[in-house]
Amino acid sequence: MGRGWGILGLLALVACAGEEFTSEQRHEECTSASAGALPEQAQDWDGREAVIVRYRSGSRLSAASVRSLGQVKAQYRFVPAVATRVTAEERARLAADPDVERIEPDLELRPLGLPVFSPTALLAAPRATGFVDEYTEALRLVQAPQVWDANEDGMLDTGAPTGERIKVCVIDSGIDPRHPELVGPYVKGYDFVDEDEDPRDETGGVWGIGHGTHVAGIIAAQLASGGSTYPGMSQGGMVGVAPGVELIIARVLNVQERASVSNVLRALEWCRHMGANIASLSLGAQTNMGSTAEEAFRAAADSGMLIIAASGNDSGPNHEAPLSYPAAFSSVLAVGAVDERAEVATFSNRGNGLSLVAPGVDVLSSVTMRGATLAELDAEGERYDSRSVFFAPAGEYSGELVDCGVGEPRACKAGTCAGFVAYVRLVPGTSPTRAANSVIKQGARAIIFGADESENVQWKLAMDGPGSNWVPALAVGRESRPAVLKHLGKRVHVNLKGVDYAWFPGTSMAAPHVSGVAALVWSARPTLKASEVRELLERSAKDLGAKGHDPRYGHGLVQAKAALDALQQRP
């Protein structure tokens, strides 16, 4: 399976298909069918505004005064501030309070494809034996195997640094704790979305795409712990940069992949309270998170925690975007993305504050169990080239192929409520999500999207997000489309086989590579300070681009072996 098939992509596709038609016959909706609409994000309709209130240093902030600040969500330790939701009148009173230094909006962040007993004694040791083919291109690019498997025998070298005794806190969408790659390293978590101690990437039975699971796998996936893999992949799955670390998970992104600044600040404090050495953030926003957030990140760094964040994905072929926040804060180690040739990714944000780069283009790692799929389309003994639609669930269905035009309401001319396979052509303006909802309501149990893109190039198709009632869906390119249409009215078989891994692009994938390398270095000498670990990573990086530090590559490509060699030169 090529990487363009069945992997993450959020690109809408267009089609111009002369051989296809929209039927004039109308088909009523099936009352028993449930469409795959996204779970609604909770909305507040009481007129309150989410804000972060920063008090002047030295002011006395009592419990009584906090309770009077509207609907208080959090009171912070790193800075004298609270997160709350206020009415216009309450905000005006706060603004007039001489003890209030500033009031800032509680902004939204997005992922950049979550004294308590920590059961360290119960933590399983990293699996020491696996397979060399678990070592991905990205893993080799950062020299991780050279640190813990110098002789390339698929076994962790005795006494080699693997990240043991180092706690890495992943502030993201949570994880799928069922994934075999993460069962061993995961030790503790908190869900700041659902407010419980189960940080799984799920709400109300609907699982997220596995962004946090992907990030966590890059850091800590285990040898010989493979789940369901793609053809050609190692049966052992893949291995993370630092398979000996202890993973602490803070879920702040909901299933719609949104997080608030206030929850990120709560998570930052919680990570430090849990004893985290490193906080890894693969999320952010182009808008400045605010002065209070900047203070909080600086205080967290000053407390001894190394904070690593993705630089952002807003650049393009003809423009270079500045660093996203929190990566743009000086207290944060900002990480950009490079491809397998160590060339800066087109999407990677740049700036003088960029510290390092790491692999971030088509990076293989773990995702939600069966969260990715491998597509198969069969009709009358013929197998057709097809691609999975991301967010469509694993499953299979055989039924009559029915033309549903562009997926308009009541457009499936021969469909029945007993079930059928809908054929939907993608034209400019067609939303795969809206079309899928429409044909599901008409009784479709599976969907084939006809795209205008060639099957000889990489392209990707996805729904807008996860849904509780999506049906198996795949796409065919322009080469296979005419042949597939010859089966209209005949039985076809759609099969999406669940896979526990996917290739994701983004600086979100670059940041955890640096987090893993930092853990390797720190585990080799636990007495190091966070600032010393950062200095070692930057000094030993492979210089790329313009000589010395530059806005595109920072200090260069993070290198685990070179950093360990530099450490040996320190007294």
Image: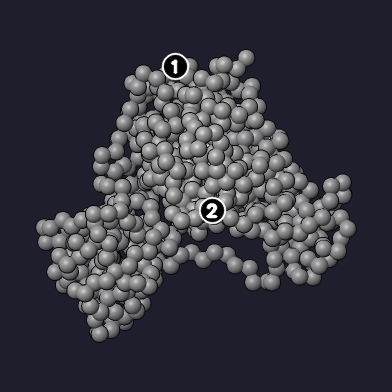
Residue 170, can we see it? no
**How many residues crowd mark 1 within 10 Å: few (<14), some (14–19), many (20+)?**
few
Q: Is residue 279 left or right of residue 225?
A: right
Task: Indicate the quadrant where residue 392 lies.
Answer: bottom left
Q: Which corner quadrant of the image does residue 34 belong to?
A: bottom left
Label of residue 391 in the image: none
User: Which residue appears farthest toward the top when viewing the image?
Assistant: 571
CA neighbours of label 2 inside 10 A, class few (<14), some (14 to 19), many (20+)? some
Residue at 82% of width from left, 63% of height from top? 95
Which circle marks residue 158 in the picture?
Answer: 1
- The residue lying at 16 percent from left, 72 percent from top is 489
**Residue 298, relative to residue 90: is it above or below?**
above
Disc number placed over residue 321 in the picture, else none: 2
Comes first in the chain, label 2 or label 1: 1
With 322 as the anchor, is 412 left or right in this view? left
Task: Compare residues 59 and 84 and report the one nearer the observer.
Answer: 59
Q: As rendered, which of 428 and 421 lies closer to the eye? A: 428
User: Residue 453 is drawn in which quadrant?
Assistant: bottom left
Secondary structure, mark 2, is loop
Tell me the CA gap for discs 2 and 1: 44 Å
- In the foreground, 303 or 324: 324
In which quadrant of the rendered image does the C terminus lie?
top right
Q: Name the mark nearer the viewer: 2 or 1.
A: 2
Going by the numbered disc 1, the residue's amino acid type is Thr
Q: Is residue 355 visible?
A: yes
**Horizontal and vertical percent for residue 487?**
15, 68
Residue at (56, 31) in percent of width and height: 538
Q: Residue at x 25, y 46 (%)?
A: 1
Mark 1 secondary-structure assignment: loop
Q: Amino acid at mark 2?
A: Ala
Measured as percent of width and height from the top left, residue 565 is found at: 51, 19
The x, y position of residue 5, in whole percent, is: 29, 52
